[in-house]
């Protein structure tokens, strides 16, 4: 099986010219087949504010009413995505910008309102790995925006980590897939104040132990749960690392 | 050769919910392979105004400075394009939204500043018909936004009529191509005040005569010159008609 790397970068990286330039250089240098998944929350917040629309977040997640859906459609699907695509083309990478609606690559359903009504936010139902795999094998590099659709004509704002995870899983039958989550830190740290305390490898059994020991806590728990769910679904390895170290040789590696 | 129809609709049609719904229904019903090319100028003007950016037009063309380029990237590449794609998917059409940067489908160069500096506006150099033809043959329906790129990482605002013409020409070696320009009137009229005075057919020699007679004048002259350039380049026929009559049976047909 040929190697494929799905790399997820947050909005912070792609919205600043200097970090974006570094990322595109590093991404271009990644060998083998690849997919880029990006966020764009900071730009969305900025454009929304300029349009007089307030950004409301609950637990780090954006409440997406109809006005905010227009903003994220513009910012994620247009501004951020198309600029990355044009920049990658200039690096000789045959990028293709996609939302989940394009070629019906990723469909979702609107998250039911429970304690919180997140509005036009999608929980993923299906990713069409076959179509993506075909394009990738032809040399196309998908650049995926954090937007999906419900199949009834409505776009839905969707977490970029989830898009990356679902894409990696859907491509696992076709490639030897590595999923890289770019993070502020160099990996999962044993001591959050010591950047040199990276835990090099976490397996299923280590995870339970590290949570019990209190080493892994807070927001890192769902991140690693997601990673373990991806490797259980056929992704070979998930790497948590910094955006400037996406070559697969750094950070914390999570396997089954 | 299989039939393919390239349909260009202006911003006015795609920005109003009722006309958009009709268009999508009519477009879905068009038989054979197809491509949709859309504008979005009115939305761009509206979003720009909300962001405090003034829209400046010269001869109907938008002056595109850096701020306006951000706006058209958001509006054409994101808001308008992705909503059309999601809506077409709901109609069972396997739409794929594209700018010229995506898969390097259409490259251009920044128009040199002469009497007017149009800013980040692109004049098309090349359309990759081969890649488009391959996707189309697989059942994908490209939905093209009026944006191209210069190959050096910069997106460029590009006239949607030109995008449609270049796409039709680039696909002419692969399909029997009909190019449909949607217009406010039902076709080219002999008497602009009489909607029943449609000229059913215009060929190269008719054109010169009709211009000499003063029947074709003003903005219609470059439109028909574009159409004739398309048929000279292998497009089988160009149809000028209303957006509610895109079935190829109405309007003015232009051939060699």
Image (cartoon, coloured by chain):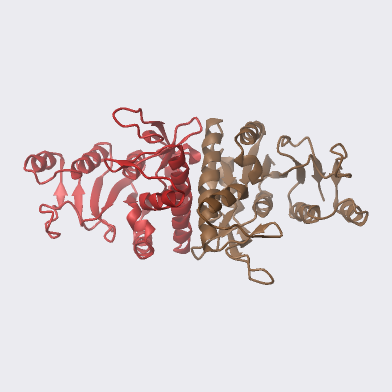
Chain colours: A red, B brown
Q: Is residue B125 above or below residue A82?
A: below
Picture layout, residue A62 above or below residue B28: below
Q: Position of residue B206 (x, y in %)?
A: 89, 51
Residue B129, x across and y down, in percent: 61, 52
Question: Which residue extends farthest bottom?
Answer: B114
Which residue is outermost to the left? Answer: A213
Residue A94 visible in rendering: no
Residue A104 visible to the viewer:
yes
Q: In the drawing, does residue A130 fall left or right of residue B104? A: left
Q: Residue A80: percent from the left, percent from the top? A: 43, 53
Relative placement, left or right, of B48 versus A198 is: right
Write down the quadrant of residue B36 in the picture.
top right
Q: Which residue is depicted at the point 47% across and 63% down?
A: A90
Which quarter of the figure is the N terminus of chain B placed in? top right
Please tell me which residue is depicted at 62% across the width and 41% down the height of the picture. B14
Relative vertical location of residue B116 with respect to residue B155 in this rendering, above or below: below
Residue A54 horizontal/vertical position (percent): 39, 45
Toward which corner of the image does residue A249 lie, by quadrant?
A: bottom left
Total labels: the figure holds 0
């Amino acid at each position: 099986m040929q190697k494929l790397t799905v790399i997820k970068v947050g909005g912070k990286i792609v919205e600043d010219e200097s970090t974006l330039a570094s990322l595109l250089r590093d991404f271009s240098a990644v060998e083998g087949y690849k997919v880029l998944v990006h966020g764009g929350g900071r730009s969305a917040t900025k454009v929304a504010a300029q349009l007089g629309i307030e950004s409301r977040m609950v637990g780090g997640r954006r409440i997406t009413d109809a006005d905010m859906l227009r903003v994220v459609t513009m910012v994620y699907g247009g501004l951020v995505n198309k600029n990355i695509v044009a920049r990658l083309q200039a690096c000789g990478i045959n990028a293709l910008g996609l939302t989940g609606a394009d070629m019906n690559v990723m469909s979702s359903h609107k998250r039911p309102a429970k304690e919180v009504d997140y509005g036009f936010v999608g929980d993923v139902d299906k990713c069409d790995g076959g179509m993506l795999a075909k394009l990738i094998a032809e040399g196309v590099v998908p650049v995926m925006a954090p937007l999906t659709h419900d199949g009834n004509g409505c776009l839905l704002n969707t977490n970029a980590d989830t898009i990356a995870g679902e894409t990696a899983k859907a491509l696992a039958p076709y490639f030897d897939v590595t999923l890289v989550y770019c993070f502020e830190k160099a990996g999962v740290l044993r001591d959050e104040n010591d950047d040199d305390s990276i835990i090099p490898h976490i397996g299923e059994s280590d995870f339970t132990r590290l949570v019990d020991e209190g080493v892994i806590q807070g927001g890192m728990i769902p991140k690693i749960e997601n990673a373990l769910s991806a490797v259980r679904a056929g992704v070979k390895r998930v790497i948590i690392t910094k955006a400037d170290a996406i070559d697969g040789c750094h950070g914390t590696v999570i396997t089954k």
